[in-house]
Amino acid sequence: MILRNLVRVLPAMGLLLLSQVQADVSSPKPNILFIMADDLGKEWISCYGAEDIETPHIDTLAAGGMKFHNAWSMPQCTPSRASLLTGTYPWRNGWVNHWDVPRWGVGYFDWKQPENMTFARLMKDLGYATCAAGKWQINDFRIEPQAMKKHGFDDWAMWTGYETGVKASADRYFDPYVHTPEGSRTLEGEFGPDVFADRLISFMKDHRDEPMCLYFPMVLPHGPFTTTPDEPDAEGNLPKHKAMVRHVDKLVGRLVAALDELGLRDRTVVIFTTDNGSGSGVTGTRNGRKVKGGKAKENEAGVCAPFIVNAPGRVPAGVETDALTDFSDLLPTFVELGGGKVPEELDIDGVSIAPVILGKAKDSGREWIMALGHGPAVLDAEGVRGKVDFATRVIRDKCHKVWVSSERKIIRLHDLNEDPFEETNLIDSDQAAHRAALEKFRKVVASLPEKDARPRYEPRAANPWDRKRK
């Protein structure tokens, strides 16, 4: 795939232009429910071969829908979220490393920047009611309480992220500190994951007669390890992790059941995925092999996410696909499902996979996908930036995967069909297929900017909790 318009400066009026999505009014408008677990690798999803746990509700989605084997997230929280919201890779949107805005201050996901157009704003222009519940973490709600609305959501219930100086804000599970349109407060006696699912279900009930785009970035099963209402006696990190994953599965089942009860199931596209691999503190067994959590790593355990799409009567049932896709594809996919077209003024890297998930195409047409972005960002005199000018990254096609250094050099080549755990580096191989793969990926690397973009945001007054430049 050739990236279009690698470097483009949008005009000042772009913010207005980009909010006007071209709609195809003749197309039906299915609801979209996008569920994204936080820190959960394939080794904890039984339909992907997990042996240490059962996830029956997620498995049912896969059995009645489409299961992807070659879907990539980014390696860590912020890069994944920025990519899926904007349809762009971290090297373009600037969030090439993790940046916990409420905790560290300074930077933020700025709605005023044309490049930060979100899928929620585009879907609203297509007539969708939009709701988000769960984890956001890329704005500080103390500074801008209406950040979610400005990013395109009609309603929301979000864990605030840990706000430096606000002790209660550390809690996302029991007695969670939750931000809604009414403000932020502790919900005593509540369990955060259930609060967020309840909000989405309530929104479904209120908007059942109009198309809905629902975003559920779960807080589960991210640390700290905790018990759940169903398993209050779990002790130890691994038993607690398993309890948290089972609660993920339970919430998936609750949401699907709510769609059934409301008569919305046959016109709702449900997508289940995760933002990156599991935390390194847990090891699961998948297809007979121990897999250590790959969060913040560029190996397959860190970036090859479970990705399941289900919609009875719309998405073919019982399909497994090797089609390539990554998180940059979500924005254009949602827009196409909603009957629209991404504005030409908006430079994105993703390609819609709507034809694949609707059974109209067997492949995504992507020649390669990419993942990058791990570890914390840094500060300089101008604010937040990546740790280096060119972040390390991985690129793959259906067979081969390369690792690219910060010097823009390919340092590892793997045949994922023969070596799924990336144990044999083929960089010095003389085989024609390996040399051809290296040449292909070198051209891709050469097409990328020499320096990654910086996050785009307007500077604001300093806060007492802002991280200082070292």
Image (spheres, rainbow, N blue to C red):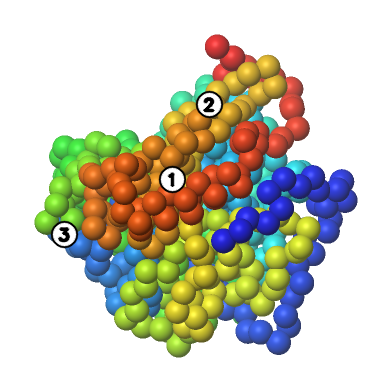
- In the rendered structure, which amino acid carries the disc numbered 2? Lys
Front position among marks 2 and 1: 1
- Dot 2, how many residues are within 10 Å of its Cα: few (below 14), some (14-19), or many (20+)? some
Q: Is residue 380 visible in the rendered structure shown here? A: yes
Q: Secondary structure at mark 3?
A: loop
Measuring 88% from the left and 51% from the top, which residue is drawn there?
A: 13
- In the rendered structure, which amino acid carries the disc numbered 3? Asn
Which part of the image, by quadrant, shows the N terminus?
bottom right
Q: Which residue, given by chain and number where applicable, does mark 3 sit on?
A: 287
- In the rendered structure, which amino acid carries the disc numbered 1? Val
Residue 173 is situated, as x and y percent measured from the top left of the image, at 37, 43
Measuring 54% from the left and 50% from the top, which residue is drawn there?
A: 444
Q: Is residue 390 left or right of residue 188?
A: right
Measuring 20% from the left and 47% from the top, which residue is drawn there?
A: 291
- Disc number at residue 394? 1
Of all residues, the one furthest to the top in this rendering is 470
* Res 258 quadrant in image: bottom left
In the displayed structure, would residue 346 be above or below residue 112?
A: below
Front position among marks 3 and 1: 1
How far apart, in angstroms, are the residues tagged by discs 2 and 1? 17 Å
Residue 235 is situated, as x and y percent measured from the top left of the image, at 15, 39
Q: Which residue, given by chain and number where applicable, does mark 2 sit on?
A: 387
Q: Earlier in the sequence, mark 2 or mark 1?
A: 2
* Res 96 quadrant in image: top right
How far apart, in angstroms, are the residues tagged by discs 2 and 3? 36 Å
In the displayed structure, would residue 54 be above or below residue 389?
A: below
